[in-house]
Image (cartoon, grey):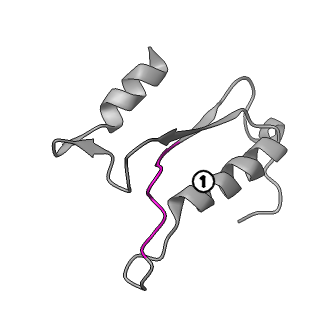
Amino acid sequence: MNESLRKEDVIDGSFPITWFIGENDTGDSNDENPFNALAASKQGERFYRDQGWKTERIILKNYGHLLSENNIGMYGQLLNEMIL
């Protein structure tokens, strides 16, 4: 990752960055799925916030990596709620 990505050097005006993370998206304890999205999103949010970006990190209770309900993806619904 870059050491610096100042917002004012990239874009004018408002451009919020939002993470949606399942609270259980912490990776497996074995080598099959070592990526911890919860920790990575925290680091990413801190990096961008420190560079002047407006950030928000939304942690969804009772979800893991696949944000779905009854096998139906929730990404469209979540984006709709954020945009409208």
Q: Which residue is the extreme one toward the top?
A: 84
Q: To which residue does mark 1 refer?
A: 41
Vertically, is 32 above or below 1? below
Q: Nearer the viewer, residue 81 or 15?
A: 81
Residue stretch rendered in magenta on the structure: 20-28
Q: Nearer the viewer, residue 17 or 57?
A: 57
| Residue 11 figure quarter | top right
Callout 1 crowding tier (Cα within 10 Å): few <14, some 14–19, many ≥20:
some
Vertically, is 83 above or below 40? above
Measured as percent of width and height from the top left, residue 55 is found at: 68, 36
Image point (44%, 14%), residue name: 84
Q: Which residue is the extreme one toward the bottom?
A: 31
Q: Is residue 13 left or right of residue 78?
A: right
Image point (47%, 20%), residue name: 83
Image point (44%, 56%), residue name: 24
Q: Nearer the viewer, residue 71 or 24?
A: 24
- Any magenta on residue 80? no
